Amino acid sequence: MEATQTLLSPNDLARAIGVSESSLKRWVDRGEIRAVRTLGGHRRIPLEEAVRFIRHSRHPVVDPAVLGMAEASGHAGRVEGSGWRALAEALRADDHAPARGMLLAAYLLGTPIARIADELIHPAMEELGGLWKHGSAGIMVEHRATDTCIQTVSQIRSLIRTPEGAPVAVGGGAPGDPYVLGSLTAAATLAEEGFRAVNLGPDTPLDVLAAAAREYRASLVWLSLSSQGRSRPSGRELAAFAHAVSEGGAKVALGGRAMPPLPTPGMPGLFVGKSMSELAAFAAGVRAAAALGA
């Protein structure tokens, strides 16, 4: 059963961005904002379309609660510059709402998901990830912070409308890798780049991922490697995996702090990245090639 779509009236969106309802209706009628009509003929705007318009037009949001993002209120200025430090402080103190608010505010400002990951989430979590050295309480802080980031990235991903006929990207965490956030963020990044992103989650066997790539006829396959555990695939295993998948027509993107050296770097169809921004750039090229039928 499909989830119920959240619809806003022109007055709702007008209040959210501080403009008149007549302006909103005019933008809808000009096609600048996609809307549907109720049985009674009233305009209704899907939430994801409202957020798309806000990000594209760079309209400041004066009442994010209308969009279901009340936590974002007052946090737009905190995500500039060294905003990751403020995020790390909020996550460390278990200030759930401000932490979510900073990430949601960054998204509403039009910041690409890849940059949110690279410039806010990654440095904040990297700082918190060292707390375990000072006692078991540090592990609790890191896990709690991870959950907050997972919830927020999932909410942001739900606001992205996948274009009809979009190319498919399939991926997950490497075998033995229990981390959720890396692959989830990759999926959100790829969704923003116009892919239908199928995230298989953590600890995904390579043969399962290869089978999924065939089943979905994927244009791109990603693998997140965040854990240094014993089950981590070797460079040789990853190279063999990438070769097999690329023979099926998909490009392969590997990345993460636990990425081992490959025996044959520079393989055709294989990308090894160090950031979500690099993944986004690579994905944009894959999508362009897919659109041309290459």
Image (cartoon, helix red, strand yellow):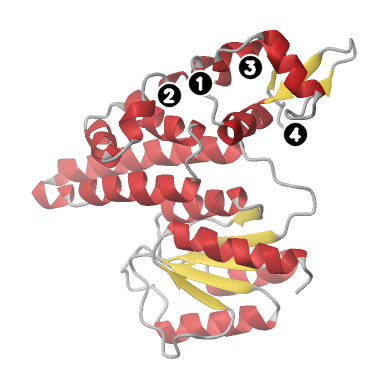
The residue under label 3 is: 13
Crowd rating for badge 3 (residues with CA inside 10 Å; few <14, some 14–19, many 20+): many
Mark 4–mark 1 distance (CA, rounded to whole Å) = 29 Å
The residue under label 1 is: 61
Crowd rating for badge 1 (residues with CA inside 10 Å; few <14, some 14–19, many 20+): many
SS at badge 4: loop
Dot in front, 1 or 2: 1
Q: Quadrant of residue 41?
A: top right
Instruction: Identify residue type, mark 3.
Output: Leu
x, y percent for residue 99? 34, 31
Query: Disc 3 or 4, which lies upstream in sequence?
Result: 4
The residue under label 2 is: 72
Crowd rating for badge 2 (residues with CA inside 10 Å; few <14, some 14–19, many 20+): many
x, y percent for residue 31? 79, 29
Quarter placement of the N terminus = top right
SS at badge 3: helix
Q: Are marks 4 and 2 in contact (CB under 8 Å)?
A: no
Instruction: Identify residue type, mark 1.
Output: Val
Mark 3–mark 4 distance (CA, rounded to whole Å) = 24 Å
Query: Disc 1 or 2, which lies upstream in sequence?
Result: 1
Mark 2–mark 3 distance (CA, rounded to whole Å) = 16 Å
x, y percent for residue 181? 42, 50
Instruction: Identify residue type, mark 4.
Output: Glu
Query: Disc 3 or 1, which lies upstream in sequence?
Result: 3
The residue under label 4 is: 2
SS at badge 1: loop
